[in-house]
Amino acid sequence: MAKLNREEVERIAELAKLTLSDAEKDMFQEQLSNILEYAEMLQQVDTTGIPPTTSALPLNNVMRADALALSLPNDEALSNAPDAEDGSFKVRAVLD
C-alpha cells in the first residue's frame, strides 16, 4: 500500500508552491494515496506481448503537406496595423 504521510504531502505542496490548510492536507493525503495505490495496481498488469502504443486510435498524420506559396506583401500586411515602424508591426512593450 502506498500511503503517503503528512510530511510527504507537505513536501509535495511546497514543491508545487501551494499553501494548504490542515483540512486540505488531510484531503490530499487521502487522494494522493489513492492515486498511488491505483498506480501500483496498474504495475501488476501483465503487458507481455503488448506493443508500446502512443495512441489508442489508429490515426495517421492529418496535416496538409507543406507547399511553397507566395506570402502577403509587407506593405499589404501592415496596411491595417495601428502602428508600424521600419517595415514591422509596432506594439507597446509588455515587460517592465
Image (tube, helix red, strand yellow):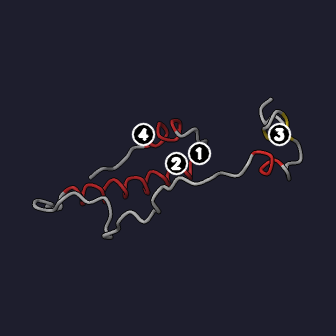
- Which numbered disc flags the more N-terminal residue, 1 or 3? 1
Q: CA distance from mark 1 to mark 4?
A: 13 Å
Q: CA distance from mark 1 to mark 2?
A: 6 Å
Taking the spot 22% from the left edge, 57% from the top edge, the residue there is 52
- The amino acid marked with disc number 2 is Lys
How many marks overall? 4
Q: Is residue 77 left or right of residue 18?
A: right
| Mark 1 lies on residue | 20
Q: CA distance from mark 4 to mark 3?
A: 47 Å
| Mark 2 lies on residue | 25
Q: CA distance from mark 3 to mark 2?
A: 45 Å
Taking the spot 21% from the left edge, 55% from the top edge, the residue there is 43
Question: Is 50 in front, or is 35?
Answer: 50
| Mark 4 lies on residue | 8
Determine the secondary structure under disc 3. Answer: loop
Question: Is 29 in front, or is 85?
Answer: 85
The reply to whether dot 1 and dot 4 touch (C-beta < 8 Å) is: no
The reply to whether dot 1 and dot 2 touch (C-beta < 8 Å) is: yes
Q: CA distance from mark 2 to mark 4?
A: 10 Å
Q: Residue furthest right?
A: 82
Q: Residues within 10 Å of mark 1 (few under 14, many from 20)?
A: some
